[in-house]
Image: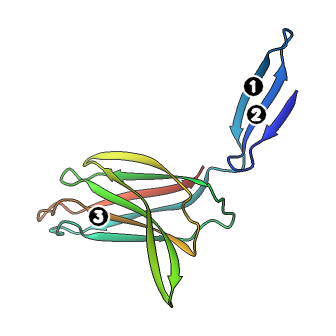
Amino acid sequence: MITAVNESTKLSQEVKASSNGELLVKLGSQSGNNEQVYDGSAAWANSSSANTNKDIDITPPTTLQVNGLYAVTVINPSAVTALTVVAQNKGTFGGSAKYSTLAQFSVAANTNRTVIVQGWMLGEGARLTLSNDTGLGVADGFTAYVRVRKV
């Protein structure tokens, strides 16, 4: 039997030959991952206009992977608006910070969504920008919750 670990995904595999000569592969679990990178929230006040951005700056983990996978979970409790979520990498060019978009997704009103983003956090920092797609009424303020895990 041979056990191999993919260094990119940390997924272990066991390979062995059966009695009739066939190769059997058993996938193991990931090791050293599932690190929580961010856990927090973003709040919109009552009467917020549509497309009000909330920026969440995230410090990248100390161990970066070129093809790293990150699970971004957003809980949107608003019954009024969907949220647009943009994942960005930060870089400094000409002395000023610039944010390049890597992925974008929507979270419908009153739902939760997890999206896997690959290759994120390969710069000086990372940012999630959340924005409400619809203007809010006088009593429609809410707080969305965000968690990012390295998987």
Q: Amino acid at mark 2?
A: Gln
Residue indicated by mark 1: 25
Q: Residues within 10 Å of mark 1 (few under 14, many from 20)?
A: some
Where residue 87 sits in the image (x, y, percent)? Answer: 44, 62
Looking at the image, residue 60 sits to the left or right of residue 137; the answer is right
Q: CA distance from mark 2 to mark 1?
A: 7 Å
Q: Secondary structure at mark 2?
A: strand
Residue at position x 25%, y 53% from top?
82
Q: Amino acid at mark 1?
A: Val
Evaluate if marks 1 and 3 touch, with contact meaning CB atoms under 8 Å apart.
no
Query: Which disc is residue 131 wearing?
Result: 3
The label nearer to you, 3 versus 2, is 2
Find residue 6 and report its image quarter: top right
Looking at the image, residue 2 sits to the left or right of residue 127; the answer is right
Residue indicated by mark 2: 13
Looking at the image, residue 85 sits to the left or right of residue 34; the answer is left
Q: Residue furthest bottom?
A: 95
Where residue 148 sits in the image (x, y, percent)? Answer: 51, 57
Q: Residues within 10 Å of mark 3 (few under 14, many from 20)?
A: many
Evaluate if marks 2 and 1 touch, with contact meaning CB atoms under 8 Å apart.
yes
Where residue 103 sits in the image (x, y, percent)? Answer: 43, 58
